[in-house]
Amino acid sequence: MKYDYLIVGAGLYGAVFAREAENAGKKVLVIDRRGHIAGNVYTEEIEGINIHKYGAHIFHTNDKEVWQYVNQFAEFNRFTNSPVANYRGELYSLPFNMYTFNKMWGVVTPEEAAEKIEEQRRAAGILEPKNLEEQAISLVGTDIYEKLIKGYTEKQWGRPCRELPAFIIKRLPVRLTFDNNYFNALYQGIPRGGYTKMVSNMLEGIEVRLGVDYLEEKEELDALADRIVYTGAIDAYFGYKLGVLEYRSVRFETEVLDKPNFQGNAAVNYTDAETPWTRIIEHKWFEFGTQPKTVISREYSSEWKAGDDPYYPVNDGKNTKLYEEYKKLSISEEKVIFGGRLGEYRYYDMDAVIASALKMCRNELGK
């Protein structure tokens, strides 16, 4: 049987492309090496609670087209991401806002908070931030950097903040208001029934084969289709011939607790260096759960190695340069479209993955 498109990966990029190609009258086959669809946004039900198997995923976007697109496949609730920072038993509001500044310094007005940040920035002598540490101090001052950023970030990335690029922290909201909404996004929520249900709706009527490793059966699978949409790791596609791109991976310890409430919030970040996990997720609060039990996941960040699931590209100078070399190689693969977080080696939010897939669909399918 011959297909127009073989789509490697049943995550968001692959599912969107598959849906649009099918709608355009193309014959599509989707494969995934895992035993389930939805990639890293996969959710599974435990004790009546939709568990985010590969870490918390909160959908947020300012892109109206993307928001309307996903609402074809799911109804979203009104969840607002308001994480809490735990520093050695002290609790602070995230994102950094007037609640945070009041707890940290006792300031009451936005003017006092701004003065405190400026005072600490001047004392640090930073004019042009060159790395994450300098960028963070410029944004929120030394006290908040030391308590709420440094330990968490170095656990997450496995590198000193001085060695991380400044842009990583630029997306962190800092507000001189009492707004507890982490995302500066017009649209936000969690799909009712979980992300797996949403992706399943995207793939309705499309042939999907699970437990299929594309790179192990590449020759046979390539022969099935005119075009390949590849959403796996770009360096793996080329057999790591130029070197291995670096990622951070995440390990989860998930536990069912015989109590209705463990921490009172969906996400609590542990920002001291001594606590081995980066955060604890209590999944029921993503959907305002009333179940008699609760399920929590402790997240441990680690350096990626072969056999692990890659999560976050390490977009420093060395890796960016290596990716550009792989990208040049990819141009010669005329039959293959490289897309998604791994295929493009980019730190993508979900809405950006979908927007990228829709853009590719317009270029490829003329729609």
Image (cartoon, grey):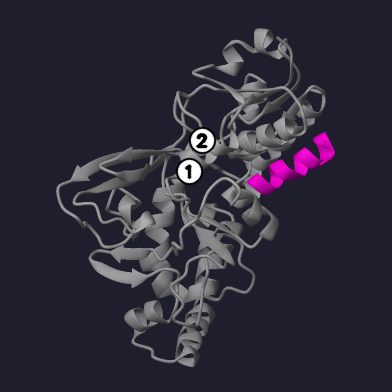
* Residue shown at 48% from the left, 54% from the top: 58
Relative image position of residue 356 (x, y in whole percent): 70, 45
Tell which of 287 and 88 is nearer to you. Answer: 287
Circle 2 Cα neighbour tier, 10 Å, few/some/many (<14 / 14–19 / ≥20):
many
Judging depth in this view, the residue of 269 and 365 nearest the camera is 365
Q: Which residue range is magenta in the image?
A: 354-367
Question: Quick check: 243 above or below 264?
Answer: above
Horizontally, residue 51 falls left or right of residue 38, namely: left
Asked which quadrant contains residue 178, the reply is: bottom left
User: Which disc is residue 38 wearing?
Assistant: 2
Q: Quadrant of the C terminus?
A: top right
Mark-to-mark CA distance, 1 and 2: 7 Å
Q: Earlier in the sequence, mark 1 or mark 2?
A: 2
Measuring from the top left, give residue 8's x and y in whole percent. 62, 25
Q: Where does residue 305 sit, x and y in percent of width and height?
A: 46, 29
User: Cβ–Cβ below 8 Å for labels 1 and 2?
Assistant: yes
Residue 281 in sight: no
* Side of 136 where 357 appears, left or right: right
Camera-side residue of 55 and 190: 190
Predominant secondary structure in magenta? helix
x 70%, y 13%: residue: 222
Secondary structure, mark 1, is helix
Give the residue pinned by disc 1. 195
The residue drawn where x is 67% and y is 42% is 320
- Disc marking residue 13: none
Residue type for callout 1: Tyr
Label 1: how many Cα within 10 Å (few below 14, some 14–19, many 20+)? many
